[in-house]
């Protein structure tokens, strides 16, 4: 708004490419997933993460008198810059334009531009000025789970969390580009009654879209959601002074699991809701605009006693001197011209479906291996899944169990539709995949596989992207289930919802791949 050690395998949305760009050049959207498979290495034992009890919303009133953080100003990750309350890669701030096209996959190591893609609406269906947007936005090529139109969830986190910095964006795992690594972001200090009123006002801002706002309980990890941390100050993040801050330039809303911040406490309900909705809007691809009567306006009077909404007309985008607007292609689509005007609501409505009930449950099938398949000890087991729903925005995971013992649970954050299991000892295993939509409808598929042969040491295979057993994934795309580190956090540390302990012994961290995006259209692929 206004004014130790590092395990690269655990960087969900890290920008591990650093191309030299100039104004007018094109770079990959920094939040786009890569499509790399989830790799789970069992050679050191089970990978089950024990979750500590979550803080309770009903205890919020206890935090009213908690003092604010007294820390020196943090430092943004290298290559990122702050403009007001928006933080973007320097290349984009200097005029490069982020896009999400498959042909740009070569600029991001490890990206598979073809796997899992399906057709969906493009410029002709989404744009008021398709001739101005052709070749610059909405190519209609989606990954499963991120297709348009979507349904969505916003989680307003009032209870705080230990956030992990330097690893991109993953709301489910507490990764935030703007986090102080390992710092406890404080609970909201405005009390329960005010928190509920603010959440209701934010929900009203998204009333024209199938986007729900939740705050009592955190959504399950498999479901993609935007998380906004409510409370604290800018000193609880790596950003500079601001009323709120968010990662920006997520054109076409590629990042399904962004994290943003509203530094509010005792402000009026309308002010808190205005700040929160603006930061959420930034995560969905909206920039600042001129004007003082809409939630995306830069520099409006935060003490104004009015609850603003998203703009319903094309409004000039606010840009710094010598810099371009971040999402010119999308702006050209909805407002024509040179992309210097933004239509808030039409941009959001291109992504999200109209409000209304969703009565079609999602489905998921394990297409490989076959139920009852057998594998030799040391052989990698590639589990391929076929998820589907009538709306985008859904997510899926896998659970590996032996008898009644759960060995691992992992979300396909990269939307790769693949889980690679390495190092399973001899035995029979139950593999369960579950899919969930934003109506909290769940589908599942279950198979069993057998690993035959004598037990012993197994060595995880290497790939062109890194060694799955060592945690080396230079592109940030491969999952490493054997690493005990999480971007500088030793395995003895615990985040908000993760623990690395097992009977006094270190439990290997479950390495999870970042959410991907773009996907299938409403109809199931034949």
Image: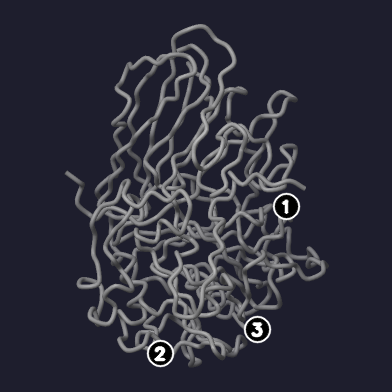
Which residue position is annotated with label 3?
Answer: 3
Q: Kindly indicate the quadrant of the structure image that contains residue 82.
A: bottom right
Residue 490 position within the rendered picture, expressed as x and y whole percent measured from the top left: 74, 41
Ranked by sequence position, the earlier of labels 1 and 2 is: 1
Question: Which residue is located at x 48 percent, y 84 percent?
Answer: 324
Q: Earlier in the sequence, mark 2 or mark 3?
A: 3
* Label 3 neighbour load within 10 Å: few <14, some 14-19, many 20+: some
The reply to whether callout 1 and callout 3 are in contact (CB within 8 Å) is: no
Q: Position of residue 221 (x, y in %)?
A: 50, 45
Mark 2 surroundings within 10 Å by alpha-carbon count, few (fewer than 14), some (14 through 19), many (20 or more):
many
Residue 461 % position (x, y): 51, 28
The residue most toward the top is 454
Q: Position of residue 101 (x, y in %)?
A: 35, 63
Tell me the distance, in whole angstroms, between the alpha carbons under discs 2 and 3.
20 Å
Q: Kindly report the distance in space between the C-alpha atoms of the residues bearing marks 1 and 2.
A: 39 Å
Quadrant for the N terminus, please: bottom right
Q: Secondary structure at mark 2?
A: strand
* Residue 462 placement, left or right of 36: right
Image quadrant occupied by the C terminus:
top left
Q: Which residue is mark 2?
A: 315
Q: Could you tell me which secondary element the residue under label 3 belongs to?
A: loop
Question: Looking at the image, which is closer to me, 103 or 309?
Answer: 103
* Discs 2, 3 touching: Cβ within 8 Å: no
Answer above or below: position of 68 versus 469.
below
Q: Residue under label 1, please give it.
A: 182
- 508 to 456, vertically: above or below: below
- In the picture, the disc for residue 71 is none
Left or right? Give the position of 233 relative to 1: right
């Amino acid at each position: 708004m206004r004014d130790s050690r590092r395990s690269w395998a655990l960087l969900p949305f890290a920008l591990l490419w650093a191309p030299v760009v100039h104004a007018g050049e094109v770079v990959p959207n920094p939040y786009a997933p890569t499509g790399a498979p989830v790799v789970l290495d069992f050679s050191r034992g089970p990978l089950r993460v024990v979750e500590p009890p979550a803080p309770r919303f009903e205890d919020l009133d206890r935090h009213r008198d908690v003092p604010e953080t007294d820390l020196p100003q943090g430092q943004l990750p290298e290559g990122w810059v702050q403009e007001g309350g928006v933080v973007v890669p320097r290349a984009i701030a200097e005029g490069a334009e982020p896009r999400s096209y498959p042909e740009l996959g070569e600029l991001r190591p490890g990206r598979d531009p073809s796997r899992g893609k399906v057709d969906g609406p493009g410029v002709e269906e989404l744009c008021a000025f398709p001739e101005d947007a052709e070749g610059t936005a909405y190519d209609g090529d989606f990954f499963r789970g991120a297709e348009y139109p979507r349904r969505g969830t916003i989680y307003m986190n009032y209870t705080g969390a230990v956030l992990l910095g330097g690893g991109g964006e993953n709301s489910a795992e507490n990764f935030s580009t703007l986090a102080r690594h390992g710092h406890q972001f404080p609970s909201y200090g405005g009390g329960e009654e005010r928190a509920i009123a603010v959440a209701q006002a934010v929900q009203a801002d998204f009333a024209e879209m199938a986007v729900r706002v939740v705050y009592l309980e955190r959504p399950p990890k498999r479901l993609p959601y935007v998380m906004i941390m409510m409370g604290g100050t800018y000193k609880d993040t790596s950003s500079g002074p601001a009323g709120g801050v968010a990662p920006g330039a997520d054109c076409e809303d590629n990042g399904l699991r962004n994290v943003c911040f509203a530094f509010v406490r005792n402000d009026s309900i309308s002010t808190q809701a205005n700040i929160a909705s603006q930061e959420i809007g930034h995560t969905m691809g909206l920039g600042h605009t001129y004007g003082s009567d809409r939630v995306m306006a830069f520099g409006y009077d935060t003490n104004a006693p009015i609850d603003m909404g998203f703009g319903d007309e094309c409004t000039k985008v606010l840009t710094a001197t010598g810099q371009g607007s971040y999402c010119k292609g999308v702006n050209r689509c909805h407002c024509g011209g040179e992309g210097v005007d933004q239509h808030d609501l039409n941009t959001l409505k291109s992504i999200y479906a109209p409000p209304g009930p969703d009565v079609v449950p999602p489905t998921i099938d394990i297409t490989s291996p076959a139920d009852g398949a057998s594998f030799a000890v040391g052989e990698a087991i590639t589990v391929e899944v076929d998820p589907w729903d009538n709306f985008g925005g859904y997510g899926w995971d896998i659970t590996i169990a032996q008898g009644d013992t759960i060995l691992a649970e992992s979300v396909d954050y990269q939307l790769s539709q693949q889980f690679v299991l390495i190092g399973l000892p001899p035995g029979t295993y139950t593999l369960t995949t579950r899919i969930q939509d934003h109506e909290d409808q769940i589908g599942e598929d279950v198979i069993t596989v057998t690993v035959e042969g004598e037990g012993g040491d197994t060595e995880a295979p290497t790939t062109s992207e890194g060694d799955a057993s060592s945690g080396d994934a230079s592109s940030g795309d491969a999952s490493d289930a054997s690493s005990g580190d999480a971007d500088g956090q030793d395995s003895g540390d615990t985040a908000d919802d993760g623990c690395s302990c097992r009977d006094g012994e270190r439990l290997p961290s479950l390495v999870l791949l970042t959410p991907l995006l773009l996907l299938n259209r409403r109809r199931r692929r034949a």
